[in-house]
Image (cartoon, rainbow, N blue to C red):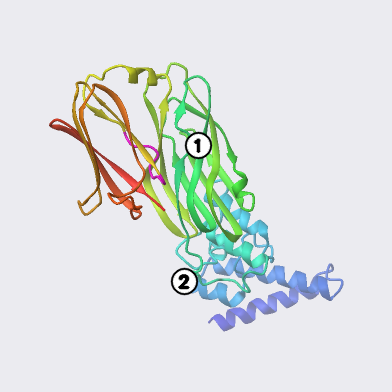
Amino acid sequence: MYVMGGFFITCVFVHLLYKSSSCLDLHHCLVKQRKLKLHISVALLTRLPEMEKLNYINMNGIYGDVDLNTLVQAYDAGLILQYLVDMIDLTEAQQLVGNVSLDESLSALDASIILQYMVHQIDSLPYDTAQGELLAAGGLGIGGEYFTPGTSTIIPVLLQEGLNIYSFEGEIDMNIDHFTLDSIGWSANVDSYAVEAMVDSNNHIVFAGASSHGYDFSGSLMQLYGTVEMGFEGDSLVISVDKLMLNENLEFIDYQIGVLINTVSLDQFALIPEHFSVKPNYPNPFNPVTHLDYGIPASGDIQIRIYDVTGRIVQELKFIDQAAGWYTYTWNGTNFAGEAVSSGLYLCQIQSGREFEVEKMLFIK
């Protein structure tokens, strides 16, 4: 059945080619032939059963040509990034030919693989990513610690301990009713990446980037420029990451990456709290240190313990007859022996008398 269909298409192509008055020489004929074959290929591709689409793409060699212009170009990688941040839509056929890593969906790594192909890092498309050389690691954090209502605020978003980063994509949720995000600025650390970002009316940021080479870096990824409205009386602002993917490795889903403290509320730390209180640690995830603010309404003994996920105590600190007020505990990610702990989730329990609170902390290397 497919042989007959292919014979019919070839006959139509030959007829159209020789009827065309614009086919002036062999080069123009070949270009016109390739464009006509691609047009027919895409039309046929959308009609094939799902299981046969990938086979058809393999046979016709159109992987990576996202704009369907018969060429694989860096522009095709850019289209993938724009699609990932919801700037444009791609048809089913475009998504199929763009999925050069042959996994379940388009990702920023597909854009990177196309860029690698353009600079001859990769000989052909599609590319098998199961070999392991495209594994990556890292995490997100927040560089700033304070804000003042009514004034411009710059929030550095940090990539922490980034290793072998060919591509990245993620979603950051400010989740702040009183914050207006004005713009996003990319750091010089990502000058070698093609990047895209979009922000919706709810301060939800979607971003993606890809490069032809894998880089190791720790530091600023982007800066968020905005303003907290005048009169905001909250103690802090919480920033969370809905998703972080490095290459095609999913690092985080729905995790708090930072807390910014209101400088106006700092004056309240001079006051004695009405009840025992522990604020979320910041930054989170962290490396190398994180901080927890706690307040006690009356003098008494304070016990601070850090547990790993097995329930084993890895660090402990006691204060005898600590005066009422606000305090900050800083943990540098070490155990009793002063050795750095392994990456992972830890629990910090701060206890005052019979009251205690527990905060989850993620340490990354």
Q: Which residues are magenta?
A: 280-288
Q: Would residue 124 be found to the left or right of residue 207 on screen? A: right
Viewer can see residue 112: yes
Helix or strand or loop: what does disc 1 sit on?
loop
Which amino acid type is marked by label 2? Answer: Ala
Return the residue at label 1.
200
Q: Nearer the viewer, mark 2 or mark 1?
A: 2
Q: Is residue 127 above or below residue 252?
A: below
Residue 214 lies in the magenta-colored region? no
Instruction: Determine the residue positioned at 26% across, 20% down.
Output: 273
Residue lying furthest right in this view? Answer: 24
Residue 147 locus on image (x, y percent): 47, 26
Instruction: Determine the residue positioned at 60% across, 48% down.
Output: 189
Name the chief secondary structure element in magenta.
Answer: loop
Residue 162 locus on image (x, y percent): 49, 54
Q: Pointers 2 and 1 in contact (CB under 8 A)? A: no
Residue lying furthest left in this view? Answer: 354
Instruction: Determine the residue positioned at 67% across, 69% down.
Output: 120
Which amino acid type is marked by label 1? Answer: Asp
Disc number placed over residue 151 in the picture, else none: none
Q: Would residue 105 be found to the left or right of residue 82 on screen? A: left
Helix or strand or loop: what does disc 2 sit on?
helix
Return the residue at label 2.
130
